[in-house]
Each structure stands twice: as C-alpha cells, then as structure tokens.
Image (cartoon, grey):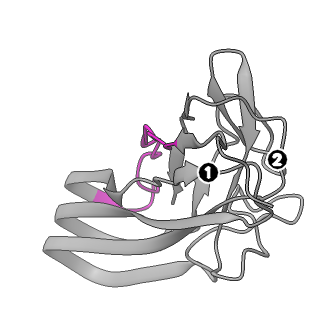
Amino acid sequence: MRLPLSPVLLLGLAALFVLAAPAPPAQALCIGCSCTVSVADNLNFGSYNPLTSGAVTTTGQVGFHCTIAVGVGSTVTVQGIHLDTGLYGTSFARKMGSGSNRINYNIYVDSSHTTIWGDGTNGTGVRPSPPQTYSGVLFVLTNIDQQYTMYGQVPGGQTTVIPGSYADTITVTVVF
C-alpha cells in the first residue's frame, strides 16, 4: 500500500573537518613541514524516506597532505586518521541534528558497513590500517598524499524522524 503523502527528509552531512596534527618526532629535524586534512567529498545522504525499510548509503573522501621542505633522519609513521563522534552521538551511535530532532547514521571504514570509523578504540577502525611508515635519511621537497573512502549509512526503519535538513560536524585528527 502506498501512502499519498510520504514525508521525505533531506539529509546532508555538512562535515567540518579539522586537523589536529602533533609536531614531528623530537629525534627528527623537519624544516618547513606542514600537514593538512583534505576532504575531497563530504558525505551527502540526499533524501531519506522513513516509511521504507532500506538504508541510505553514500561515500566521501578524506585524507591528508603533508609537505616536508627538508627533513633529516626522519621516519614518519601515520598511525591513523581518527574521526570523532560528532556533535550529537557516540562512535557507535552517531546522530545528525535538525534543531532538537535527531537521526541515526554512521561512518565506516569498509563498504560492507561493518567497522565503524572512530579512533581505533572499543572496536572502531581507522585508516590507514596498518599504519603507514615513510622513512628516509633525507627528505627534500617531499609531498605525502593519501586519500581514503568514507562509507556513510543512515539505517532504514527510523519511522519517528521529523522532516528537515539534518547535519553533523566531525573532527578529523591525523595521528603521527
């Protein structure tokens, strides 16, 4: 049976990604070194119909770009790109908000939506996995770029969701 007026929600994850990168290791000399988080695509879930049982999925890209003008005796290990829990939830139950209304969603490291992208604790995953190491005696005008796919999902069956435009803000931390 089809209802003539089914409420449809417009969802968008207008994510604000922030870099929190610690200084290079004390044993390394790094001149003109900088890192930034890059977000090629925010997660945008489009429309969600709470009267259907299907999930809404989407993908986006997040990564980092590091520049080393001169680095001596350097080994840089990227331990992981961590995503925080957002403004309204926990890593296991992220929520987007529209005023006081909420809708559940999450971000995963895999396309099967089985491992939640978090900070690597309590069963959450991070990217890269395993950590990536960049080694060298001398780095001169070196760029390190990595991009990773984020897999977003709004679970189906959230029948009490109020129509609106929903968003969340996620902080991204690159751990070296």
Q: Which corner quadrant of the image does residue 18 belong to?
A: top left
As for residue 15 lying within the magenta part, the answer is yes
Distance between mark 2 and mark 1 Cα atoms: 10 Å
Residue 75 seen from this side:
no
Q: Nearer the viewer, residue 15 or 44?
A: 44
Please state, as top left, top right, bottom left or bottom right, where the N terminus lies in the image: bottom right
Q: Position of residue 73 (x, y in %)?
A: 33, 73
Whether residue 97 sits left or right of residue 157 in the image: it is left
Count of numbered labels shown in the rendering: 2
Callout 2 environment at 10 Å: few (<14), some (14 to 19), or many (20+)? some
Secondary structure mostly seen in magenta is loop
Q: Which residues are magenta?
A: 11-29
Three-letter amino acid code at the position of disc 2: Gln
Q: Position of residue 54 (x, y in %)?
A: 74, 67
Q: Residue at x 26, y 57 (%)?
A: 30
Q: Which corner quadrant of the image does residue 129 belong to?
A: bottom right
> Where does label 1 land, which residue?
48
Label ID, residue 39: none
> Where does label 2 land, which residue?
158
Whether residue 97 sits left or right of residue 148 in the image: it is right
First in sequence: mark 2 or mark 1?
Answer: 1
Marks 2 and 1 close (CB-CB < 8 Å): yes
SS class of the residue under badge 1? strand
Name above or below for residue 135 compared with residue 3: below
Name above or below for residue 90 compared with residue 92: above
Q: Nearer the viewer, residue 65 or 102?
A: 102
